[in-house]
Amino acid sequence: MAPEVAAPARPYRVALVAFPGIRAFDVSVITEVWGTDRTDRTDRGAPAFDLRRVAADRANPVPMRGGLALHPDRALGWLDRADLVVVPGLDDHLTPAPAPVLDALRRAHARGTTVAALCGGAFTLAQAGLLDGRRAITHWRLIDLLRTHHPRVTVVPDALFIEDDNIWTAAGTAAGIDLCLHLVRLAHGAEAAATIARSMVTAPFRTGTQAQFVERPTPRADRDADTLAAVREHALRHLHEPLTVADLAARADMSPRSFARHFTAETGTTPLRWLLDQRVAAAQRLLERTDLPMPEVARRAGFGSEVTMRQHFASRLATSPRAYRAAFTGGNSPIAR
């Protein structure tokens, strides 16, 4: 008797919500992340995705700026089957979304489906009432506009992306890429996100708490950029060592205070937070790729002890290293909803 062959896991279903006024750039980002088949790549292929362009009227193209048009392939009812619903930003941020779209978004969230909006797409979620009493972010130039037109939304002034009650919002343009990769990371693991980032030739890991834009207030900060990049590269090669901010500052030939100031100006985050984020990312990769025991994972990622690693996983990923490994070696994320 031939051995039973397990049925392949179904593709992860992503719904791109389309209506007149959506931004072509955001549509392109969503399509590049979830609409490209990378399952057969030799460099650790990505999971299978099923991206659908969903609209209230699937019979007619959705016009976009620049003479472009999007052709829907599913009606709004397909949101009932989606694992993730993504709303692009808007060319005119006060564009009213069609009532059926707003109703469909409300139903999707009520079912527990993850809902995300890029840039001005936060205004669409706000129109649906999904952001009332919740934290949200948008492009820094639109923060006051969002507060004025949707006063029940708690607008966060400075972040790349944030989540509240399984609703994700992102700041402008590049932050939309960051959020999309982060959502892949949560559902499928750090390696899948890194594979897609490599294909897109973009940074694989920027935390949502970084500043939306980086200010370099002095000419010295520009001159320090190459030096600090070299310090970060050194840190990534030596994460297994007990590096401290003082160690990194000494390598940059700066005082710890001056180093922290210039590092934050260049990257939008503090040296300590950046270093901890990189250690968590390194531990994620080890948990996904290897069967090393937990103490060895903690050592190689530079945490020093399994207890310390567990604390940082809990604060950043809301899970434990053991649960993370079990989920991603078994194919089901404890984080994705």
Image (cartoon, rainbow, N blue to C red):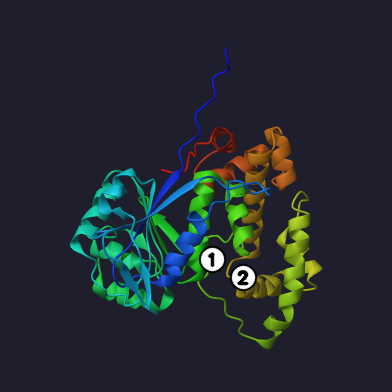
Judging depth in this view, the residue of 292 and 118 nearest the camera is 118
Quick one: quadrant of the C terminus?
Answer: top left
Q: Mark yes or no: residue 10 visible.
A: yes
Q: Residue at x 54, y 45 (%)?
A: 47
Q: Which three-letter amino acid code belongs to the residue tagged 1?
A: Gln
Judging depth in this view, the residue of 122 and 70 nearest the camera is 70
Judging depth in this view, the residue of 1 and 106 nearest the camera is 1
Q: Which residue is drawn at 63% across and 40% down?
A: 288
Marks 1 & 2, CB-CB < 8 Å contact: yes
The residue singled out by tag 1 in the image is: 210
The residue singled out by tag 2 in the image is: 267
Q: Which residue is drawn at 50% across and 72% down?
A: 212
Quick one: quadrant of the N terminus?
Answer: top right
Kindly report the distance in space between the C-alpha atoms of the residues bearing marks 1 and 2.
8 Å
| Residue found at the very far bottom of the displayed protein | 219
Among the 4 quarters of the image, the one containing residue 330: top right
| Residue found at the very far top of the displayed protein | 1
Judged left or right of residue 331, residue 63 is left
35 lies above or below 148: above
99 lies above or below 314: below
Judged left or right of residue 3, residue 139 is left
Disc 1 is placed on an element classified as loop
Within 10 Å of disc 1 (Cα), the crowding (few <14, some 14-19, many 20+) is some
- Upstream in the sequence, badge 1 or badge 2? 1
Q: Where is residue 13 in the image (x, y as percent from the top left)?
A: 41, 46
Judging depth in this view, the residue of 301 and 191 nearest the camera is 191
